[in-house]
Image (tube, rainbow, N blue to C red):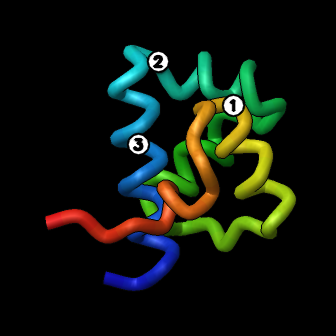
Amino acid sequence: MNIKTLFGKNVREFREAKGWSQDKLSDESGLHRTYISGIERGFRNPTIEIVHKVSIALQVSISDLFKETT
């Protein structure tokens, strides 16, 4: 799995674990909902600043957003 796909998968899992919609994550992170969708589908290549915004919004560490799970 490439890094963009892994990051997007983990963002989606953490977002869904909180019971949030993409709109809610958008509101919390200050990013547009379509950008969140692109991240989750592995189409976006977010900067470290975007990664940081997402981690703060989801209240998880940056490293958690890049962990591979089985």
Q: Residues within 10 Å of mark 2 (few under 14, many from 20)?
A: some
Kindly indicate the quadrant of the structure image that contains residue 56.
top right
The image shows residue 58, relative to residue 46, as above or below, that is above
The image shows residue 8, relative to residue 37, as above or below, that is below
Q: Which residue is under mark 3?
A: 12
Coordinates of residue 22 in the picture (x, y in percent): 53, 27
Coordinates of residue 66 in the picture (x, y in percent): 48, 67
- Three-letter code, disc 2: Trp
Q: Which residue is under mark 2?
A: 20
Secondary structure category for the residue under label 2: loop
Please state which of residues 40 and 65 is positioned toward the viewer in this rendering.
Answer: 65
Q: Which residue is under mark 1?
A: 57
Query: Which tag is nearer the camera, tag 1 or tag 3?
Result: 1
- Three-letter code, disc 3: Arg
In the image, is 33 to the left or to the right of 53? left
Q: Residue furthest bottom?
A: 2
In the image, is 22 to the left or to the right of 52? left
Kindly indicate the quadrant of the structure image that contains residue 33.
top right
Q: Residues within 10 Å of mark 1 (few under 14, many from 20)?
A: some
Q: Residues within 10 Å of mark 3 (few under 14, many from 20)?
A: many
Question: Mark 3 or mark 2, which is nearer the start of the sequence?
Answer: 3
- Three-letter code, disc 1: Ala
Image point (40%, 66%), residue name: 67
Image point (36%, 27%), residue name: 16
Secondary structure category for the residue under label 3: helix
Question: Mark 2 or mark 1, which is nearer the start of the sequence?
Answer: 2
For the residues labelled 2 and 3, say whether their Cβ atoms are less than 8 Å apart: no
For the residues labelled 1 and 2, say whether their Cβ atoms are less than 8 Å apart: no
Give the Cα distance between marks 1 and 3: 13 Å
